[in-house]
Amino acid sequence: MTSTLTLGLRARNAAPTRRRYQICLIHPFDPRGQKVGGLETYIRDFITFHPDDTDLLFVGVDSVGDLKLGEIRRLTFRGRDFDFLPILRYTDQQAREAAKTIRSSLTGQFFSALLRHFIPVSRLIRERGCTVDLRRVEFSWLPTLLRRPYVQMLHGEGAPKLQMDSLLRKYSFVHNFGERFAVSTSSHFLCVNPFITERLKNTYPSQKDKIDTLWTWVNTDIFKPQPFADSTDPFRVIFAGRLDEFKDPPLMFRTIARLREKLKGKLEFHYIGTSDPHRFAEFAAIEDITVRHGFKDALGMASTLANAHAGILTSEFEGMPRCVLETLAVGRPTVAVHLPQLEAVIHDGRSGYLIPRSNSRDEMVEALADRFVDVRNAIDSGTLDPFDVAGAIADFTPATQLARVYTYHQQIQDARGLTPSPAH
């Protein structure tokens, strides 16, 4: 598989003596595992699209149980090679269970593992001349201690007054301290949407020049527009991702139940993900029309999304939701409760609908259900083109977003002379 981004990045490898770039990714994750989400997709795509003149060292987690901790293994993922250094064994099942303390959480255990493996990890980063790429501010102490430049990204965790399915809500001071520290010590601090970016620039005005927005993206080599099925009977609505409280599953399930009434039962709800919907009482009303797909890799996700007619999002907070981008990329419109960043990709009547927020949940349920009826009628009449829907995400591809991160690392290494000889 050769993408436009890959071709563009390979073009600068013409000189055979060019020195190689070295990037170290540090994140509590195993790309071979079944964990899904925005953070996980970032890591997988970072490996998939990394330039040919760049070597990756990934310090992470063994979720399978087949690797020796503290020992580098050369792995191949989606046809791309990288060096993997697992420092913690933590299964996908453990990751799905809510931790009750910081120490027992995946983030907390990975933090402790970094301390235990500090000497070999630091030696590898220094010997290779790596710049570091971080997804969590809680780990920003490591490159700072090693005096290695790093690029930090904030995905939105710890935002105030939001319900989060993690310990960050209880221990928000940990995240807030990490945020302040990372803003002051990183080379670049990237945020998932301009609203977080603006907040940070206002909070840390002396550091505003290093703070910027990096929108998420969708892999258009995998997620491509597909024709609609011949029939909308049943009409299939889909959601992919974790059922965190801030995504408001009760509102989502109530909307599906109301839409079922409007369509006289000719409806299916499809869920891609590993969360248990039964913990929300509203799910009982739609359980019999729900198809639970569990974990899907990118190819399976694309195929399952293309089998649906429309996506749904009811979140109170998001970055730029990757599930929305992937749904749109396969040509399926999305009906969502309004978030400012969604205005960039959801255009009423063309790629779905944005529903205004209201103090009345009944009003939002009714409005969401009505817009889904509009989508179904547009599909039936042939006035909704999957290729037009997919066109809404033209600016949200690896070639326009992820390539910027590689460029930051290259610029830092070029300016500071960090890049070692090819025979590192």
Image: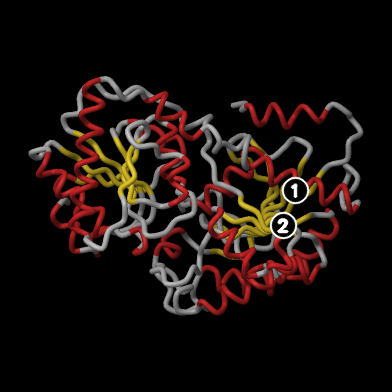
Asked if 13 appears above or below 141 in the picture, the reply is: above
Q: Which residue is denoted by mark 2 in the rendering?
A: 188
Asked if 200 appears above or below 14 in the picture, the reply is: below
Q: CA distance from mark 1 to mark 2?
A: 8 Å
Q: How many neighbours does mark 2 have within 10 angstroms: few (below 14), some (14-19), or many (20 or more)?
A: many
- Give x and y (percent) for residue 281: 18, 63
Q: Which mark is residue 241?
A: none
**Is residue 236 left or right of 226 when viewed as pictured?**
left
**Is residue 298 left or right of 261 when viewed as pictured?**
right
| Quadrant hosting residue 260 | top left
Callout 2 amino acid: His
- Give x and y (percent) for residue 148: 81, 62
**Is residue 209 left or right of 155 when viewed as pictured?**
right
Q: What residue appears at the point 44 percent right and 30 percent down from the top-left corner?
A: 390
Q: What residue appears at the point 24 percent right and 46 percent down from the top-left corner?
A: 368
**Is residue 283 left or right of 415 when viewed as pictured?**
left
- Give x and y (percent) for residue 139: 65, 68
Answer whether residue 413 is visible to the viewer in this image: yes
Asked if 378 appears above or below 214 in the picture, the reply is: above
**Circle 2 sits in a helix, a strand or a loop, which is it?**
strand
Q: What residue appears at the point 56 percent right and 47 percent down from the top-left corner?
A: 215
Marks 1 and 2 close (CB-CB < 8 Å): yes
Q: In front here: 123 or 386?
A: 386
- Give x and y (percent) for residue 109: 56, 72
Callout 1 amino acid: Tyr
Q: Which residue is denoted by mark 1 in the rendering?
A: 408
| Quadrant hosting residue 150 | bottom right
